[in-house]
Image: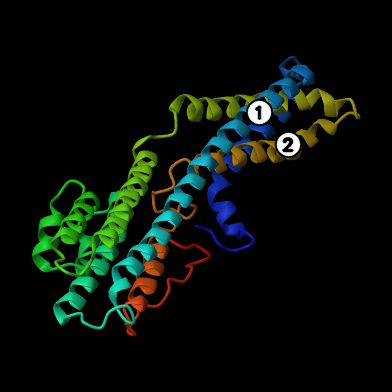
Amino acid sequence: MYVQKHIHWRVIWGYSWKDLLIFIVYDLTLAILHGPLGMTWLDIPWQLVSILGVAVSFYVGFKNSSSYNRFNEARQLWGGIVNRSRNWTMLVLANTQPARTDLTPEQVSYQRQLVYRQLAWVNALCLHLRRQTKEQWNQAVAPFLDPAESDYLRITVNPPAQLLLRQSQALQEADGLFDDLQRHALVEDLRELTNLQGGSERIKNTPFPRQYAFSSVVFVWIFIALLPLGLLAEFEKMGHGHYWFTVPFSVLVSWVFVTIELVGHISEDPFENRMNDVPMTTLCRSIEIDLRQMLGETALPQPIQPVNGVLY
């Protein structure tokens, strides 16, 4: 996720230099055909182009709004994961001081295991949504699990779902650590975590409808192709030779439209580990710091810092 206030010009240039080159060549060619070569029959009424531009604007606006809603929902789901992870840890540790003083070392270790498995779950969900390879598992997930449990989960189809199942089983095996009311509250947290995972998977596995995404691109480029044909005659009305103004103005308007369409396109899939996606790695690190501090640990990792203004 890009976090700087202003987007650096290099980022904009990296996305748009190819399109700008196409616009310049195309608009300059039409200006030469219209002026020096006298092919004025290429001109079309500006009114038709403006009507098309309004229609395309509404359509692209609808697509961008829908794309942003997908990103916003994804960020809200991960905000819920952050909150539920903290809540889970507070409930797991509710039996510590000053509520109880009779916990055995085995029970304290069991509490730590429940919290660490939650850390494994958030990192496993991040890898699962990004479809990242098993190599990242050793760095992000395995350190929070027993080796045998980690080896088993590594080969499962949906490791995050298996981790939630293991958490539910672990609650039943925690003899004397939780009473019925506390266990019920923890099970409710697991149910909510399952819902949050399901919501994230729904966004990941349901692509933005192609009929909207593809049509938006087609309509924008049709408008861009017709735009200079409508501007040539309009600028020519200002005086002979003014048709050359078509090139800069048409390039500018075309760049605006294609950039607006691109903004919607890059928001369609918020779990692809790109610069504008949900920063799941950063959120996982933030969760890890919070939960390990709740456990009383002091050797904590540092928060992830932006790289070139981007949090991943």
Quick check: 58 left or right of 301?
right
Q: CA distance from mark 2 to mark 1?
A: 25 Å
For residue 137, above or below residue 34: below
Res 201 → quadrant: top left
Q: Which residue is mark 2?
A: 247
Residue 249 screen position, x and y as percent: 75, 38
Q: Which residue is mark 1?
A: 58
Q: Residue at x 69, y 34 (%)?
A: 28
Earlier in the chain: of badge 2 and badge 1, it is: 1
Res 46 → quadrant: top right
Q: Nearer the viewer, residue 301 or 106?
A: 106
Element marked by disc 2:
helix
Residue 172 screen position, x and y as percent: 16, 58
Residue found at the very far top of the displayed protein:
41
Residue 303 in sight here = yes
Quadrant holding the C terminus = bottom left
For residue 65, above or below residue 113: above
Q: Residue at x 44, y 28 (%)?
A: 210
